[in-house]
Amino acid sequence: MKGGISVGFNHDSDATLTLEVTVVKENVFNNSVKSNAWYYSSYTIIVESDGGGGGDDCPDSEPNKNPKFYFKTKEKNGKDKIIGKTCKFLQKKSTAQKVKECNKTKSEGGLAPAKDVCVRTCCLVSS
């Protein structure tokens, strides 16, 4: 049996994706009759979106996987210890806590503020 797949792509707008797939199969019979049978199947799949998050202009995801932002400096054994947190940590917080962290501008110990690291999370609470 031989087969082939043809895929057509049509992107009408920001909210609709149409995928057309045509499958062609040839069945070869090994008998005294020298004929082959061709089968065609065509499928159209339409995926519609609500605009990706309610029409916001925020990125679809955070720019880096598991990045850390500067959270606070804590004194431990007489020394300052820099505490970093992940965007996942921030996403679990209340809206008020997210706004508070996203409005901070201080960076410390090579860690940037949440607004520069957790771009999507901070964008969603500011819109």
Image (cartoon, rainbow, N blue to C red):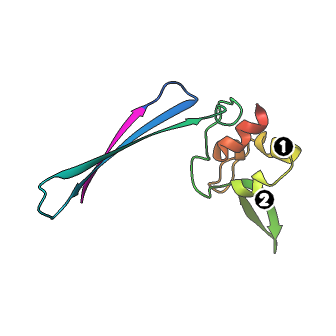
Using the image, determine if residue 80 lies above or below residue 111.
below
Instruction: Determine whether, in the image, residue 38 is placed left or right of residue 85.
Output: left
Location of mark 2 (residue):
73
Mark 2, other Cα within 10 Å: few <14 / some 14–19 / many ≥20:
some
Q: Quadrant of residue 77?
A: bottom right
Amino acid type at image mark 2: Thr
Q: Residue at x 11, y 55 (%)?
A: 34
Picture quarter with the N terminus: bottom left
Q: Residue at x 81, y 45 (%)?
A: 98
Q: Upstream in the sequence, badge 1 or badge 2?
A: 2
**Closest to the observer, 64 or 43:** 43
Question: How many numbered callouts?
Answer: 2
Q: Position of residue 59 (x, y in %)?
A: 61, 38
Quadrant in which the C terminus appears: top right
Asked if marks 1 and 2 touch (Cβ < 8 Å), the reply is no
Mark 1 Cα shell of 10 Å, populated few (<14), some (14-19), many (≥20): few
Magenta-drawn stretch, dominant element (helix, strand or loop): strand
Q: Which residues are magenta?
A: 1-9
What number is the disc on residue 54? none
Query: Seen in the image, is 30 located left or right of residue 110?
Result: left
Horizontal and vertical percent for residue 45? 50, 39
What residue is drawn where x is 57% and y is 51%? 64
Q: Which residue is situated farthest in the front direction here? A: 32
Q: Secondary structure at mark 2?
A: strand
Counting from the top left corner in percent of width and height, residue 109 is at: 65, 57
| Label 1, label 2: how far apart the Cα atoms are | 16 Å
* Residue ID at (69%, 36%): 53
Residue at which label 1 appears: 100
The foreground one among 19 and 41 is 41
